Image (cartoon, helix red, strand yellow):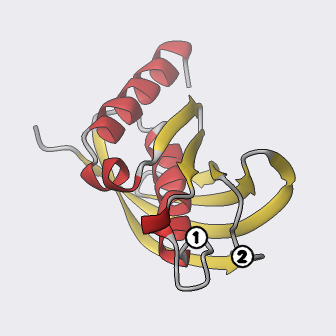
Amino acid sequence: MSAQDASDGAAQVRRSFAQQPFMHTIGGMLEHVGEGRTSIRLELTQPLTQQHGFMHAGALITILDTACGYAALSLATEPSEVLTAELKVNLLRPVACAAVIAEGRVLKAGRKLTVCQGDAYDADDRSRHLATILATMVLAPRED
């Protein structure tokens, strides 16, 4: 991928993220976009907790899935959309930290399917690995 293609992929990711209402609703913030990699930050707020005060698994899985999807989109060479076809998650410990960083990276990019791995960490202590996800993303041409 050329530097221009990578730049176009990053711009495509930023535009798409800015238009995603659910990330705005939960407070997800796009922190980094690189070639085949993205990271999203999510603060632990009371509406995102479950009955024990930990971050709800749904919120954690959401940012992991989203980070993987945008990692896949960052490699798209034409205007595209990305949808999750499959995912498997391992929740490694309860999330009680102030904020989480979800990092998505492409393991194998194909013409239609892209396999990604996502890892979530305590934003203040990256040695605290919170969850991991393996996801398959489907790339589809965007209909403008």
User: Label 1, label 2: how many angstroms apart (C-alpha)?
Assistant: 7 Å
Q: How many numbered marks, from 0 up?
A: 2
Where 15 falls versus 84 (above or below)?
A: above
Q: Is residue 126 left or right of residue 50?
A: right
What secondary structure is marked by label 2?
loop
Q: Residue at x 46, y 55 (%)?
A: 66
- Where is residue 20 drawn, in percent x and y? 28, 47
Location of residue 89 (image quadrant): bottom right
The front one of 104 and 99 is 99
- Where is residue 67 drawn, in percent x and y? 53, 51
Q: Residue at x 58, y 40 (%)?
A: 38
Q: Is residue 136 left or right of residue 94?
A: left
Where 142 falls versus 64 (above or below)?
A: above
The front one of 101 and 78 is 101
Q: Is residue 124 left or right of residue 52?
A: right
Q: Residue furthest bottom?
A: 51
What secondary structure is marked by label 1?
loop
Quadrant in which the N terminus is drawn: top right
Quadrant in which the C terminus is drawn: top left
Q: Residue at x 41, y 66 (%)?
A: 84
- Where is residue 12 drawn, in percent x and y? 35, 31
- The answer to which of marks 1 and 2 sits earlier in the sequence is 1
Mark 2: amino acid: Pro
Q: Is residue 59 left or right of residue 13?
A: right
The residue at which mark 2 appears reads as 94
Mark 1 nearby-residue class (10 Å; few <14, some 14–19, many ≥20): many
The residue at which mark 1 appears reads as 55
Where 84 falls versus 38 (above or below)?
A: below
Is label 1 in contact with label 2 (beta carbons under 8 Å)? yes
Mark 1: amino acid: Met
